[in-house]
Amino acid sequence: MPEVVVFPTASWASVILSDQLTAYQLAEPEAEQAALCVLVKTKEPKIEWRLATRSGDDLTEFLVKADIVAHDIASGRFYKRSGKWCAWCDFLPVCVKDEKRVEETLVKIAYSK
């Protein structure tokens, strides 16, 4: 049976709500469940398996959400979702409305392709 394993630090709720696990389930339809192998940050760190199952309704809900996001991106609508990754994101100038750096960033990205 195919398996996909990810090693994040994640709460139980984030496992249950994880779009990433839902996408993995769609990518490997034969898999009966998906799991995150979580590093639990305690005095003595430990690793726990956090299992999740996805129903047909869960998969349909994810596909509808993905379709909405894809249409928004195609229409030029992007939603801010701040986090630690912002520090190295090429598009940070767009989120903080730094017009000069937005232009520099978009030109740099266009020429790198």
Image: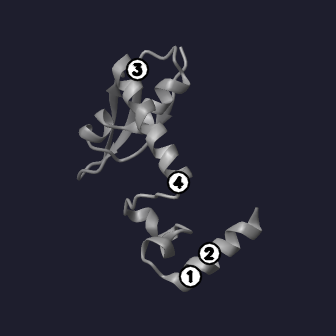
In the rendered view, how is the structure colored?
Answer: one colour
Q: Residues within 10 Å of mark 2 (few under 14, many from 20)?
A: some
Disc number lying in front (3 or 4) = 4
**Pointer 3 residue:** 33
Please tell me which of labels 1 and 3 falls first in the chain. 3
| Residue 21 visible in the snapshot | yes
Please tell me which of labels 3 and 4 falls first in the chain. 3
Disc 2 from disc 1: Cα separation: 6 Å
Could you tell me which secondary element the residue under label 4 belongs to?
loop
Three-letter amino acid code at the position of disc 3: Gln
Could you tell me which secondary element the residue under label 2 belongs to?
helix
Disc 1 from disc 3: Cα separation: 44 Å
Q: Residue at x 49, y 30 (%)?
A: 24
Q: Residues within 10 Å of mark 3 (few under 14, many from 20)?
A: some
| Residue 43 screen position, x and y as percent | 23, 53
Disc 2 from disc 4: Cα separation: 20 Å
**Pointer 4 residue:** 75
Quarter of the image for residue 108 reads bottom right
Disc number lying in front (4 or 1) = 4
Q: How many marks do you count on the picture?
A: 4
Q: On screen, 6 above or below 4?
A: below
Q: On screen, 14 above or below 64?
A: below
- Asked whether disc 3 touches disc 4, contact meaning CB atoms under 8 Å apart, the reply is no
Three-letter amino acid code at the position of disc 1: Arg
Three-letter amino acid code at the position of disc 2: Thr
| Residue 30 screen position, x and y as percent | 52, 14
Q: Residue at x 39, y 61 (%)?
A: 80
Could you tell me which secondary element the residue under label 3 belongs to?
loop
**Pointer 1 residue:** 101
- Asked whether disc 2 touches disc 1, contact meaning CB atoms under 8 Å apart, the reply is yes
Q: On screen, 82 above or below 7?
A: below
Disc 4 from disc 1: Cα separation: 22 Å
